[in-house]
Amino acid sequence: MSELDDFFAEVTRLIDAELEGMIPADGARPQSLRDAIRWSLFGGGKHFRPALLIAVGRAFGAGDAKLKRTAAAVEMFHTYSLIHDDLPSMDDDDLRRGRETCHIKFGEATAILAGDALQALSFQVISDDANLSVETRLDLVSRLAKAAAKMVVGQQLDLEAEGTQTSLEDIEQIHRNKTGALIRFSAEAGAVIGEANADELSAISKYGERIGLLFQITDDLLDITRTTEELGKTAGKDVAADKATYPSLRGVEETRELASQVHRDAREAIESLDVRGATLRQIADFIVNRNA
Amino acid sequence: MSELDDFFAEVTRLIDAELEGMIPADGARPQSLRDAIRWSLFGGGKHFRPALLIAVGRAFGAGDAKLKRTAAAVEMFHTYSLIHDDLPSMDDDDLRRGRETCHIKFGEATAILAGDALQALSFQVISDDANLSVETRLDLVSRLAKAAAKMVVGQQLDLEAEGTQTSLEDIEQIHRNKTGALIRFSAEAGAVIGEANADELSAISKYGERIGLLFQITDDLLDITRTTEELGKTAGKDVAADKATYPSLRGVEETRELASQVHRDAREAIESLDVRGATLRQIADFIVNRNA
């Protein structure tokens, strides 16, 4: 295992323990809602967003006690967005992380409500985190709310783009909102909790933005180069839906070059920071090379 | 027009102006999402929850500048819950406030996203309200998030109760969560912004809880005693869905007596408060007598 594998495994243990404490298997009714939330929350996700938050936070010297609840909230928020995006009226996906999506397993109404609850719980977890100052919590809530609105905008633009002529600028606008906003929030949240100054926050924001774009570009590449089994989610969906992607507009080779450029940008953004940034560099390297 | 009619008209002007400023008719894409949000937000609602918030806040001497943004956020939040509750997989309602529901008009995906966006925007509006202290904003966010989770629980319990043997206790649990939580939040938020002390907040919380229950009991009564045209939404739905309600379990007469008792409780809760409470009493009287 690489150093980064160890780090991801550590984050998974940390986040899963937090989430277990917040939403235990048994508790107040309704059990179905609890089961649906837990099905999606403990579905074997990579915990990339909480890992990014914790990596940035640690780089600025913040302890895990201050980071872990917001990191868990980010995972909840991400899970809410996956559950809703998978719905029949949206991307209509039956498979996620190698198993049934929430609405296939628990029905559509429960899936919608599980997503709604996870959005609310994310805000609750951050606003009630006694390890953070009142100012920090409010700053995080405000930033998360703005990222949340962007994610909805991105999903709507994405749905509307299907079957239409889409430019590279359109695609970037979709990604910046749909997936980029929460990834950037995750990086920024780590810096906010780590009490970064304005210049540092700005550098991390740039890094988070590039990491988010890189994540999406490599996602597009994986969709056409890997199988459903390898990905644990339906592969080839973009082509099947006649969806414009980086490779469909620019070809695989040019898209790989673009990914390399964005990867360099991400590393450059944090180059001048006086922080313990090894993990941040490893994360950028990991995404550009990922194969699932 | 009664004094209370004037008050409701004033609140509607105040809230609609706030909401117009927050979500103008023209702005950044996607227009469809904007249209869908505005369709439901400016759908001729009574603004009962923001009115309650403002009435309580004014009773404690808070100015409208401090109250109006949280009041607008409550209306956004309520609208989100209506949009999602009306969805085909939930209550499957085509009609709301005398016109098409959001998913009938704009499609299901856009309706789900409009609801998701409104939940996020509610938290954003409160967390960014520079008229309130950081502590107050965070308190409101935390309370709203908890109410939000309860609303989801109530809706899920309600869906699961359909077609099953339901007791009066079950019904109360559903209502306390599904509709009661946000009504109580509205009352409490007014008191929090008005800097009520602990005893006062507790009295207002009790008042809000009773007002919420009263609202639901009279809603159940209206569903069986009024027509669709009179209500502006589908009447007789509870009977059609074989849904247990106060009148279906206890009959219309006993339910009317229960409403009178809950109305007295609500008025008693605020009796000892040293505040300008005339509007609060009028609101309780209005609900017990409402006919739409």
Image: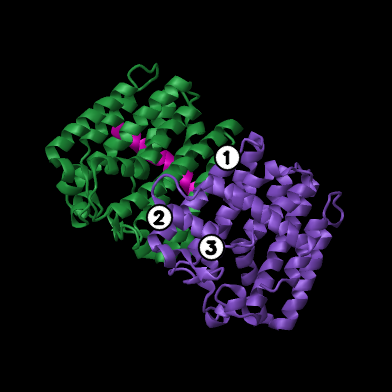
Chain colours: A purple, B green
| Residue A168 part of the magenta-drawn span | no
Which residue position is annotated with label 2? A32
Q: If the image is split into quadrants, where does the C terminus of chain B sit?
A: top left
The residue shown at (53%, 45%) is B123
**Residues behind callouts 1 and 2 on a single chain:** yes
Residue in the picture at 57% in, 57% down: A78
**How far apart are the alpha carbons under marks 3 and 2?**
18 Å
Q: Which residue is mark 1?
A: A127
Q: Main secondary structure of the magenta part?
A: helix
**A80 with respect to A251 (left or right):** left
Judging from the image, mark 3 belongs to the subunit labelled: A
Disc 2 is attached to a residue of which chain?
Answer: A
Q: Residues within 10 Å of mark 2 (few under 14, many from 20)?
A: some
Give the residue type that dot 2 points to: Ser
**Residue A146's x, y, as percent?**
59, 51
Tags 3 and 1 touching, CB below 8 Å: no
Rendering quarter of residue B234 = bottom left
Residue B128 visible from this viewpoint: no
Among numbered discs 3 and 1, the one appearing first in the sequence: 3
Mark found first going from the N terminus, 1 or 2: 2
Neighbor class of circle 3 (other Cα within 10 Å; few <14, some 14-19, many 20+) is: some
Are labels 3 and 2 on one chain? yes
Q: Which residues are magenta?
A: B4-23
Disc 1/disc 2 C-alpha distance (Å): 26 Å
Mark 3 secondary-structure assignment? helix
